[in-house]
């Protein structure tokens, strides 16, 4: 994974591993606007797809979520992001909700 330097609270720097593959998970919609969550998800996906990351297509993520939920008997919203990432090729996920 690529690394970056992050300034610490003092004069020290910390090495931070940056993700190389990003999966933008579905967002929860707590608004009155019917398609707000999907529009936000597509916007976030577009940001990452134009950045130097390998992005996973949204349809591929959605298919993977369905399979993961079937295999585990749990909803993905009840899982920790690390659990979801381990079951995919992603080295980072972007979630909200």
Image (cartoon, grey):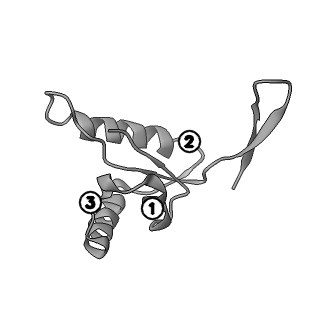
Query: Which residue is rendered at x = 46% and y = 66% of the image?
Result: 88
**Label 1, label 3: how many angstroms apart (C-alpha)?**
12 Å
Q: Quadrant of residue 80?
A: bottom left
Q: Earlier in the sequence, mark 1 or mark 3?
A: 3
**Label 2, label 1: how many angstroms apart (C-alpha)?**
25 Å
Q: Earlier in the sequence, mark 2 or mark 3?
A: 2
Quadrant in which the C terminus appears = top left
Quadrant in which the N terminus appears = bottom right
Percent position of residue 29, x then y = 22, 36
Q: Is residue 6 above or below residue 79?
A: above
Look at discs 2 and 3 and give the one toward the viewer.
Answer: 3
Look at discs 2 and 1 and give the one toward the viewer.
Answer: 1
Q: Which residue is mark 3?
A: 75
Comparing 7 with 4, the one in front is 7
Q: Is residue 88 above or below residue 1?
A: below
Q: Which disc is residue 83 wearing?
A: 1
Q: Left or right: 33 with respect to 39? A: left
Query: Which residue is rendered at x = 37% and y = 39% of the image?
Result: 96
Q: Left or right: 51 with respect to 62? A: right
């Amino acid at each position: 994974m690529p690394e970056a330097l992050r300034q610490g609270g003092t004069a020290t720097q910390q090495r931070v591993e940056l993700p190389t593959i990003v999966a933008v998970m579905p967002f929860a919609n707590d608004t009155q606007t019917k398609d707000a969550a999907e529009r936000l998800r597509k916007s976030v996906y577009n940001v990452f797809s134009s950045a130097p990351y390998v992005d996973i297509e949204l349809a591929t993520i959605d298919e993977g979520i369905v399979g993961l939920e079937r295999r585990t008997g749990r909803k993905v919203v009840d899982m920790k992001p690390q659990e979801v990432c381990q079951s995919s090729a992603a080295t980072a996920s972007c979630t909200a909700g």
